[in-house]
Image (cartoon, helix red, strand yellow):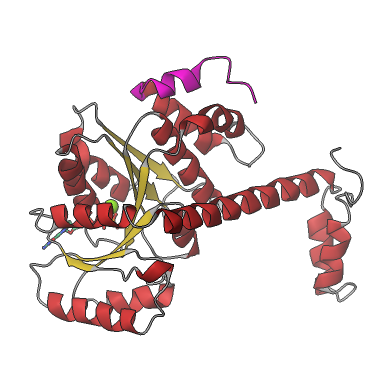
Amino acid sequence: VAAPPDGLATRVRAGDARAIARAISQIEDADSAGSGGAALIGALFPHTGRAYLVGITGVPGGGKSTLVDQLITTIRGTGLKVAVLAVDPTSPFSGGAVLGDRVRMNRHAADPGVFVRSMATRGHLGGLARTTADAALVMDAAGFDVVLIETVGVGQDEVEVAQTADATVVVLVPGTGDDVQAMKAGIMEIADVFVANKADREGIDRLVQSIEAALSLQPVVDGGWIPPVLKTEATTGHGVPELWQTLCRFRDRSETLRAERCHARAHARVRALAGELLFTRLEQALPHGAFAQAAADVVARRRDPYRAAQDLAAYVPDSSGSGAA
Ligand SMILES: Nc1nc2c(ncn2[C@@H]2O[C@H](COP(=O)(O)OP(=O)(O)OP(=O)(O)O)[C@@H](O)[C@H]2O)c(=O)[nH]1
Ligand SMILES: [Mg+2]
């Protein structure tokens, strides 16, 4: 795929903040795997793969943005450039939480080594994970060494977003039964590092113990890395340098393990994109109202749901033996 004619990719690679912002908007506006963003990603992709993508997820109000702000300070202190993607799955427009993120992180606004961007969900399945992954690629191509991706870990969509990162930090706070909620929502399984934030609050040790207890019940996977549980106080920055050190340690673990994870992630991405492309092809091939008709047939017991789905899927020609169309 050729680079877009406006040289947007070139300007992104030069680290031009306005070009980066425009590129991410273009990705957000692309409503399917086949449109707009694909050419841009095609031009940028050969220049990616350097950045360390760290997902920060956890309960609403757990202190994720405050923690991200402190992490920026710590990471900038080592000379590395940092980009932040604050993903807001709840509001399609810039709501309170996102505005809060901007305010919290704006002390870094004058620093050219920091780029902060909020993104809202587009609402369709898998869309959030895709736009997040693509926006992170833009930041990677722009030369940021670390990309911090903040999401509220409450649903499957957010778990998928977390899985686009190289490392995932799950943030919990004491005294609200959040640890139990997190286990239910399946975010325990995705954590590479646990943060027990608001360490100034009562119940912090109980929280750490309950996370460790839950961890001891899980099989040890990923080459024996047992997710460390760190105490932080994001408002003061206590524990944040240790968090960054732990993340560096996680990154430096065996090359084989990292390669395996990258492969699994690439596999999942290509699969999801291929599925999206096929579905788009199906939607284009179907006569108008075909889905509504199928639903009506199922309700009236004229067709069972399997039969209806098979009939619809048949509109995409069986490509066996036909190769590229
Ligand atoms: N006491 C205490 N308060 C904290 C700590 N960290 C963050 N907070 C406060 O918790 C509130 C929420 O912090 P945020 O950083 O906005 O939390 P968040 O997880 O990003 O919130 P959402 O993005 O809305 O889910 C703010 O009032 C913070 O000042 C901490 O370590 N101790
Ligand atoms: Mg936040």
Q: Nearer the viewer, residue 119 or 262?
A: 262
Quadrant in which the C terminus appears: top right
At horizontal 21% and vertical 58% (from top left) the residue drawn is 63
Q: Nearer the viewer, residue 277 or 253?
A: 253
Rendered position, 112 above or below 210: above
Rendered position, 189 above or below 71: below
Rendered position, 264 above or below 41: below
Q: Is residue 84 magenta?
A: no
Residue 176: x and y, percent?
A: 23, 76
Q: Nearer the viewer, residue 266 or 222?
A: 222
Q: Is residue 6 magenta?
A: yes
Q: Which quadrant would residue 221 be assigned to in this image?
A: bottom left
The magenta span reads 1-17
Quadrant in which the N terminus appears: top right
Q: Is residue 91 left or right of residue 72?
A: right
Q: Which quadrant would residue 306 be assigned to in this image?
A: bottom right
Residue 94 seen from this side: no
At horizontal 83% and vertical 57% (from top left) the residue drawn is 313
At horizontal 7% and vertical 67% (from top left) the residue drawn is 200
User: Which quarter of the rendered image does ligand 1 occupy?
Assistant: bottom left
Residue 74: x and y, percent?
A: 16, 44
